[in-house]
Image (tube, grey):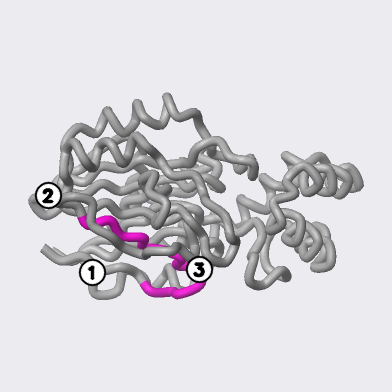
Amino acid sequence: MRVHVVSDVHGNSGALARAGDGADALICLGDLVLFLDYADHSRGIFPDLFGVANADRIVELRTARRFDEARDFGRSLWAGLAVDRATAIEAAVRRQYAELFAAFPTPTYATYGNVDIPTLWPEYAAPGTTVLDGERIELGGLVLGFVGGGLHSPMRTPYEISEEEYAAKVEALGEVDILCSHIPPEVPELTYDTVARRFERGSTALLDAIRRTRPRYALFGHVHQPLARRMRIGATECVNVGHFASTGRPFALEW
């Protein structure tokens, strides 16, 4: 059995269409949407709406962790649009989802990232794409569990939930061979982004589950430039399988 795994696609539909080549299945751990590319400020929903100069400014504020100023600046820009914020974002996300979901090979098993909008996924997921969140499947004789979304953060992205709700989804999986999530377990080396120079939110519930149930692998994304891309926690190999938007290369698992 050969499975390719990607996360943090962020609009890279071209590479996504090739991500399943040579594999029996593709796993996607979320963040399909590209709202703002921190490496190229001309790409994404934000610069399309407000221009590159404003994208430069909001990246500068967020990188400096001046989140309140960034939110105030963003509000002033949204207030100047002819349509309301929700309408503008949904229209842009729909355009991206139409292209990205069409690029998924069959079969694909996917869960949500923190920048995704789960309510829209049923409209775009074709029969060959199975969406899982707090659920498990059997694949090639192994059990895989999926946990989507992220935890509340200063970024206030679309699919952030409470630690209690997240932990309930992890608990619902039980023992699995491969634990698949968008965010990493709460380990400093796995949550620190060396380019953004900040810790992203990791999950203590995931870390507890890894220590308790000892899956073979814990696969995740979310942190684009982590201090450590992989490390072992007990019997479990923890692997950051992103940032696919930048690399265009899936992580391959064989068993």
Whether residue 247 appears in magenta in the rendering, the answer is yes
In the current view of this chain or complex, which residue is farthest to the left? 141
Tell me if label 3 and label 1 are in contact, CB under 8 Å.
no
Residue identifier under label 3: 245
The mark lying in front, picked from 2 and 1, is 2
Whether residue 167 appears in magenta in the rendering, the answer is no
Tell me if label 2 and label 1 are in contact, CB under 8 Å.
no
Say whether residue 106 is visible.
no
Q: What amino acid is at disc 1? A: Ala
Label located before the other in sequence (2 or 1): 1
Residue pictured at 54% horizontal, 39% vertical? 159
Dot 1 falls on a residue whose secondary structure is loop
Q: What amino acid is at disc 3? A: Ala
State the image quarter where residue 189 is shown.
bottom left
- Work out which quarter of the rendered image holds the N terminus and state it: bottom left
Dot 3 falls on a residue whose secondary structure is helix
Residue identifier under label 1: 23
Label located before the other in sequence (3 or 1): 1
Q: Is residue 50 above or below residue 163?
A: below
